[in-house]
Image (spheres, helix red, strand yellow):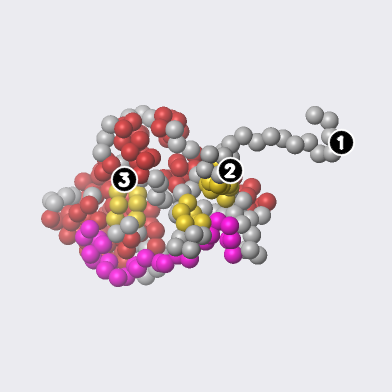
């Protein structure tokens, strides 16, 4: 499924709450906010905390559609896909007695953009994403119309301790010794969820950038919050004054 959080950002705008304020109120990190901005999946617990804070239902802040309707990949076969989406939109407008102005108001698209699209011109992937605001009926019709034109790509699993770059491990993959269990607890310092495959190899459930060099790590820290767990004692070098 493809996940979109435009409902959430629309809702907090209506409530005059900033994105940073919301994350602080629910105790979430900036990396979680970055994932939602990029329409990436986040832990269900985060969604529940947001719903509790805003006193709403999950459907009020999240939209899930079949992967084949993920318009971010619409750059391929642009004309054909735009033609299909146009036909779906026209049918949806006719069925629900909506005008071009109604569509523009619901989706936050300009009236000229809606008119241009209906009249046969292509629109951007961002504009298609806004059309998803028309609701589940439109989204489902779009998915049925696309059929197998946009199959989901199978992504290669990248393991946290062996990222395929000269055998290097991800710098964000950290371990903390649990004195009670007498074993290491693994976690991602960027906040990405982790899991083990059937061979007990650790991988990030979501798309961690997996930095393996200083340059890659510096770039990743510009986008994600890096947070180490546990207490660390500074050990001075030989001869160093403390």
* Numbered disc 1: secondary structure: loop
Q: Residue at x 33, y 38 (%)?
A: 48
Image height of 144 relative to 20, above or below: below
Asked whether residue 166 appears in the rendered view, the answer is: yes
Foreground: 192 or 25?
192
Q: Which segment did they paint magenta?
A: 140-164
Q: Determine if the magenta segment contains residue 147.
A: yes
Q: Nearer the viewer, mark 1 or mark 3?
A: 1
The part of the image, by quadrant, that contains residue 82 is bottom left
Locate residue 169, reporting x and y percent. 61, 57
Q: Is residue 6 magenta?
A: no
Q: Disc 2 marks which residue?
A: 177
Task: Look at the image and tell me whether residue 224 can be seen.
Answer: no
Question: Measuring 38% from the left and 53% from the top, which residue is drawn there?
Answer: 126
Q: Position of residue 47 (x, y in %)?
A: 35, 41
Residue nearest the viewer, comparing 80 with 175: 175
Where disc 2 sits, the SS reads strand
Q: CA distance from mark 2 to mark 1?
A: 29 Å
Number of residues whose C-alpha sits closer than 10 Å to that of mark 1, classed few (under 14), some (14–19) or many (20 or more): few
In the picture of the structure, the residue carrying the numbered disc 1 is 239
Quadrant in the picture for residue 11: top left
Q: Can you identify the residue that label 3 sits on?
A: 62
């Amino acid at each position: 499924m493809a996940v979109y959080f435009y409902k959430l950002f629309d809702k907090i705008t209506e409530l005059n709450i900033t994105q940073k304020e919301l994350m602080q109120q629910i105790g979430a990190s900036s990396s979680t906010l970055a994932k939602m901005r990029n329409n990436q999946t986040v832990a269900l617990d985060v969604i529940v905390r947001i719903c509790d804070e805003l006193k709403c239902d999950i459907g009020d802040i999240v939209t899930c559609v079949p992967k084949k309707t993920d318009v971010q990949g619409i750059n391929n076969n642009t004309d054909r896909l735009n033609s299909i989406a146009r036909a779906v939109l026209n049918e949806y407008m006719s069925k629900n007695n909506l005008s071009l102005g109604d569509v523009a108001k619901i989706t936050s698209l300009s009236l000229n953009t809606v008119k241009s699209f209906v009249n046969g011109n292509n629109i951007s992937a961002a504009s298609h994403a806004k059309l998803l605001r028309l609701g589940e009926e439109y989204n489902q019709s779009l998915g049925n119309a696309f059929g197998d034109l946009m199959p989901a790509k199978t992504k290669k699993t990248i393991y946290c301790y062996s990222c395929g770059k000269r055998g290097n491990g991800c710098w964000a993959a950290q371990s903390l010794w649990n004195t009670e269990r007498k074993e290491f607890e693994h976690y991602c310092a960027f906040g990405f969820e982790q899991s083990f495959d059937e061979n007990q190899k650790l991988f990030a459930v979501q798309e961690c950038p997996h930095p393996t060099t200083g340059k890659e790590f510096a770039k990743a820290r510009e986008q994600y919050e890096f947070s180490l767990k546990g207490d660390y004692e500074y050990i001075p070098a030989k001869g160093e004054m403390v």
